[in-house]
Amino acid sequence: MEKVTFEKWDPADDIETPEDVFGILEAAMEENDPDFLLSVIGDIARSKGMAEIAKELDLDRAGLYRSFSSSGNPSFKTVFNLLDVLGLRLRVEPKSA
């Protein structure tokens, strides 16, 4: 029997276009899970280069990684500023029935 090996998959490796970013964020918002949404935002940030983003936010790169890790808890201000650096904004709309 042939041995099967797996490589660790990083979603950040597959986020390349603005359409990818929009699609993954839209899907994450539909899950209504704040932890998952933060994880996805972290994936997007990693796909764009965490060091450069941290520099633009005047934050430590390692701290930014920690903030968006599974045990992280970034402030709303950090999330808002990160989305701004990524060229994104939050939008609120009524729930559909």
Image (cartoon, rainbow, N blue to C red):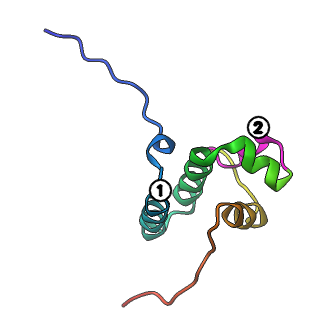
Front residue of this view, candidates 4 and 89? 89
Query: Residue sitting at 72 percent across and 67 percent down?
Result: 80
C-beta proximity under 8 Å, tags 2 and 1: no
**Mark 2 or 1 closer to N-term?**
1
- Quarter of the image holding residue 38? bottom right
Question: Where in the figure is residue 78, as x and y percent of width and height?
Answer: 76, 60
Q: Is residue 66 visible?
A: no
Please name the predominant secondary structure of the magenta segment in the image: helix
The residue indicated by pointer 1 is: 17
Q: Is residue 62 magenta?
A: yes
Alpha-carbon distance for marks 2 and 1? Answer: 25 Å
User: Is 89 rendered above or below residue 24?
Assistant: below
| Magenta stretch, residue numbers | 59-69
Query: Residue sitting at 78 percent across and 66 percent down?
Result: 77
Q: Determine crowd level at label 2: few under 14, some 14-19, many 20+ residues with C-alpha closer than 10 A.
A: few
Question: Where in the figure is residue 89, as x and y percent of width and height?
Answer: 63, 73
Query: Residue sitting at 17 percent across and 10 percent down?
Result: 2
The residue indicated by pointer 2 is: 62
